[in-house]
Amino acid sequence: MYKSFEIIEDFIRDIYECDFLKETLDGKISQIQEIRIAHQTVRGIIDENRPPFSEEFVENVFPILEVAVQWDHLKKSKKIPKQFMQKCKKRMGSSGSNFRGTMFELDMATRCLLSNWEVDFPENYTKKGKQIDLIVKKPNGERIALECASKRGTDIIDAQKINETIQLKNEKFEPRHLKLLNIQLTQKTIVLDLTDRNYETPQILSDMSKISTCDNIDGLALTWREDIVENENHSIRIKYKCLGNIPDKYFSATWAAEFHKGPVFFLRKYVEPEPKHGKWGPEETCQSAGDGV
């Protein structure tokens, strides 16, 4: 069995308390379209011995594997507090129709944990009202109010759609809502996922002047995953572009997913420019079923 599939199995079991690799999905997750399609793809690869890293794998399975690998690394490093896991289970359990959006929240939460920042879901301890998705605390004491939005897989992502999303999310940063947190905030940020179906550089980056931030936030962090092709190898890398009154740099920890001929799959720490030394733990590899991995 592929190790990457086992990582997804463990992640699904932690969040939904049911199995992913069985031939028939549990009722808890069978109604979630993204999980159902990923399950069909994985079962086809296992049962029919199809190429493991085909286009259907990248499109249907990889979006879940991305978060599952981050989760797996944090869990093995004992960096997922019990309380945080319970809040994730509660949040994902009701995601159904907004699975992609909720997965992106968890994606950003785990990226921040990988940066050794503290993370919490504020709506779990505030009064009623529109609340932002995450509160992030850095080791230096800086506290960031973080609102997540995803346009992943959208065919056309133009400035108008981005500005509409910013305006919608901006409401959550109104003082009347933030005061319910009873927390002194250092920064208020919206992070927007622009990953397209082909993992290409977002076209909007060529004309950033049309994107407008709002008075209630300090800045906008655009993030996407981009496929860098080198001969027969693919490297899918997390990237950032920041606007407004926040530094234009990598917002949080990032990694690259490497798909190499063999087939071999592993993840590694990634920033630009890439450092000459340093690793993010042991690489997770996945080879063909015939190799017994």
Image (tube, grey):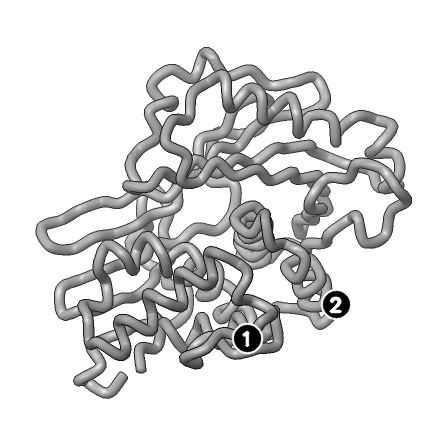
The image quadrant where one finds the N terminus is bottom left
Write the residue at 56% across / 28% down.
220
Q: Amino acid at mark 2?
A: Gln
Which residue ends up furthest to the top in the rendered image? 209
Q: Nearer the viewer, mark 1 or mark 2?
A: 1
Q: Which residue is mark 2?
A: 83
- Residue 289 seen by the camera: yes
Which numbered dot is residue 59? none
The crowd level at tag 2 (other Cα within 10 Å; few <14, some 14-19, many 20+) is few
Q: Which residue is mark 1?
A: 26
Quarter-wise, where is residue 158 in the image? Answer: top left
Upstream in the sequence, badge 1 or badge 2? 1
Viewer-proximal residue among 1 and 182: 1
> Can you give x and y, in whole percent of width and height, for residue 93 in the image?
66, 62
| 69 sits left or right of 86 in the view | left
What is the distance, in whole Å, between disc 1 and disc 2 at their CAs?
25 Å
**Position above or below: 269 against 191:** below
The image quadrant where one finds the C terminus is bottom left
Quarter-wise, where is residue 185 in the image? Answer: top right
- Residue 112 seen by the camera: no
| 97 sits left or right of 254 in the view | right
Secondary element under disc 2, as helix, strand or loop, is helix
Q: Amino acid at mark 1?
A: Asp
> Can you give x and y, in whole percent of width and height, for residue 233 in the image?
16, 55
Q: How many marks?
A: 2
| 145 sits left or right of 252 in the view | right
| 232 sits left or right of 153 in the view | left
Viewer-proximal residue among 149 and 84: 149
Write the residue at 27% across / 57% down.
56
Which residue ends up furthest to the bottom in the rendered image? 292
> Can you give x and y, in whole percent of width and height, for residue 150 in the image?
52, 39
**Position above or below: 135 against 4:** above
